[in-house]
Amino acid sequence: MAQRESWATRTGFILAAVGSAVGLGNIWRFPFQVGQEGGAGFVLIYLLFIALIGFPVMLAEFVIGRRTELNPVGAVKQLAAGRFRYAGWLFFTTGFLILSYYSVVAGWTFRYVLLGLQNDYVADVAGAEQQFLSVASGLDAVLFHALFMLAIIVIVGFGIRRGIELAVKVMVPAIIVIMIGMAIYAFTLEGSGEAYAYYLSPDFGYIGSEWQNILPAAAGQAFFTLSLGMGVMITYASYLGEDRNLAEDGLIIVGFDTFIALLAGLVVFPIFFSAGVNPGSPGAGAVFVTLAAAFGEISFGGLIGAIFFFTVAIAALSSAISILEVVVSYLIDEHGMDRLSATTIISVVIFLVGLPTTYDIVVLDLYDKLVNDILLVSGGFLIALFVGWEISDFAIDELEQGIGDLGSWGIAWLWLLRIPAVIGLLVVVLLGISGYYD
Ligand code: PFF
Ligand code: NA
């Protein structure tokens, strides 16, 4: 069998992981969750989940991946003796499902780039809604879903170094620079002060009365945005040839992702407020409708909108390739398939699974809710349980490779996984399941 691939450089690994993390989750999903869950209170709880549970779980995934140098299904099978053996399958299924609708939403962003270039955004919300429905359903949606899948087939088909690593070296710096520019632009808009207040001052009364919804939404968002709970970070760490400081890499990755999410809020909310559109409209279409209406209103909106959606589109690309890589690495490792056939075949299936979401946006909301409120947090729960309790004897050891003695930091990491992550995520999964059937 051919030798397993690996990253060419440390920066390559970090950029790939940042590219995976920074995506639609930051720029599309985060603002609409904030709007839907009542503003700054949600942001606060989200940040707590990122720091106390997300970061430790990310390190846990790194440890599994680097230790085994295998895809998530194979890695878990190798490390787990008993009941955890099949957990890898949950990751595989989740990845499949995420990519199927992620690609559809990414397709919309490409469509909105074109609308901006033609100066075709509709200034009133009702009109923008009509426009969105025509973009998000029917043949248009299917076509752009197919184009997006094709683009990631090409990148992943070229492999780790010549495909993924090369792509993220161009894309990630571009995303960061453009988003900073956008935030500065948004700051100059009239109404930005009001927007910042809405976005940044928490209403504790609202948290107290709505926590059953806010908790699972914030946890799900934390996992989605960091690409956790389905083996992306296991897979990417499995291509690390040598031992590096995983804690430092993890901090950089979490830092960039959080920075871009918070920045996206600083971009999106001033644009909403300056155009006088309501930030609280719920649902997956909200950000597209509201933003397009706003871009239709402000001067140079077409051009600015095109640049904005283009950034979202490349952020989506650099994330989608990581999801596809999880599934592809499984087929290569476990079934000895060659990369190109694995990538192509599985992409066709994923394309088909995504089709129902182009039929009706309600279906897409269902996929999204199932993934975020239940599947990713369940995956995170299993990872925390597994690394925290089952393989803890060598987990710290593995984390310390490339760092040195972690002392009480290592113990703290383990106990964050053992208690807050395990119990917190269990509660969240149960709340998520009960909320799903509401
Ligand atoms: N983290 C990506 C985002 O924020 O858009 C989405 C994502 C990628 C979720 C990979 C899950 C995943 F495994
Ligand atoms: Na993200």
Image (tube, rainbow, N blue to C red):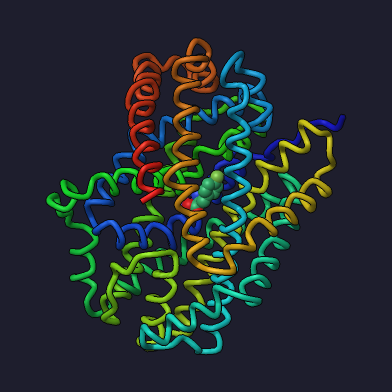
Q: Residue at x 70, y 66 (%)?
A: 146
Q: In the current view of this chain or complex, which residue is farthest to the right? A: 1
In this rendering, would 60 be left or right of 341?
left
Q: In the current view of this chain or complex, which residue is farthest to the left? A: 205
Q: Residue at x 50, y 47 (%)?
A: 371
Q: In the current view of this chain or complex, which residue is farthest to the front? A: 437
Q: Who is closer to the viewer here, 153 or 170?
A: 153
Q: Residue at x 49, y 18 (%)?
A: 400
Q: Residue at x 40, y 37 (%)?
A: 429
In this rendering, would 127 be left or right of 151?
left
The mark total stands at 0
In the depicted structure, whether residue 256 falls above or below residue 332: below
Return the x and y of residue 170 as percentages of the image width and height.
61, 58
Q: Who is closer to the viewer here, 175 or 83?
A: 83
In the depicted structure, whether residue 286 falls above or below residue 131: above
Can residue 18 be seen in the rendering of this structure? no
In this rendering, would 64 be left or right of 4?
left
* Residue 315 found in image quarter: bottom right
In this rendering, would 196 be left or right of 412?
left
In the depicted structure, whether residue 322 falls above or below residue 399: below
Q: Who is closer to the viewer here, 184 or 87?
A: 87
Return the x and y of residue 179 as percentages of the image width and height.
43, 64
Return the x and y of residue 236 as percentages of the image width and height.
61, 38
**Quadrant location of the N terminus?**
top right
Can residue 107 be seen in the rendering of this structure? yes
Return the x and y of residue 403 as percentages of the image width and height.
49, 22
* Residue 263 found in image quarter: bottom left
